[in-house]
Amino acid sequence: MDKAKRILALVTVGILVLCIVLTIVFVILYNVTNSDFYGKAWRASAFCMLMLPIILWVMFWIYNLLRGRGVKKEVTEAQEKTEE
């Protein structure tokens, strides 16, 4: 699992770097050509650059909650006492 997390982290960093480079390229092309396509493209690229880390964080947060790692020890101990 540790190796898979490391690979996923590297892929995520690569995608973020690609989004940053594409955003810069689209902004430069938009300023040079004043094309409507490049205006929409740099906004979409900037949106993906901001939303990708947030979506991944939420996915890991939900995964930890479902696996029981995000629950405090006190709550689980209290539940065990009530079950006994």
Image (cartoon, rainbow, N blue to C red):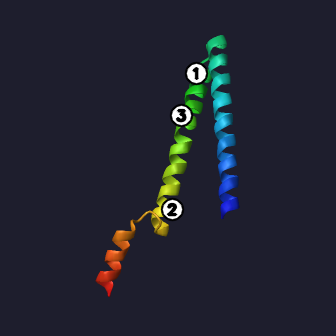
Callout 2 crowding tier (Cα within 10 Å): few <14, some 14–19, many ≥20: few
Question: Which secondary structure, mark 1?
Answer: helix
- For marks 3 and 1, give the one nearer the viewer: 3
Q: Nearer the viewer, residue 79 or 49?
A: 79
Which labelled disc corresponds to residue 39? Answer: 1
Residue highlighted by disc 3 = 47
The single residue placed furthest to the bottom in the displayed view is 84
Sequence-wise, the earlier of marks 3 and 2 is 3
Task: Check disc 2 and give the amino acid type.
Answer: Tyr
Going from N to C along the chain, the mark reached first, 1 or 2, is 1
Question: Could you say which disc has been placed on residue 61 in the image?
Answer: none
- Disc 1/disc 2 C-alpha distance (Å): 36 Å
Q: Residue at x 32, y 84 (%)?
A: 83
Q: Position of residue 28 (x, y in %)?
A: 65, 17
Residue 6 picture quarter: bottom right
Position of 55 with respect to 3 (left or right) is: left
The local secondary structure at tag 2 comes to: helix
Q: Residues within 10 Å of mark 3 (few under 14, many from 20)?
A: few
Amino acid type, label 1: Gly
Which disc, if any, is residue 63? 2
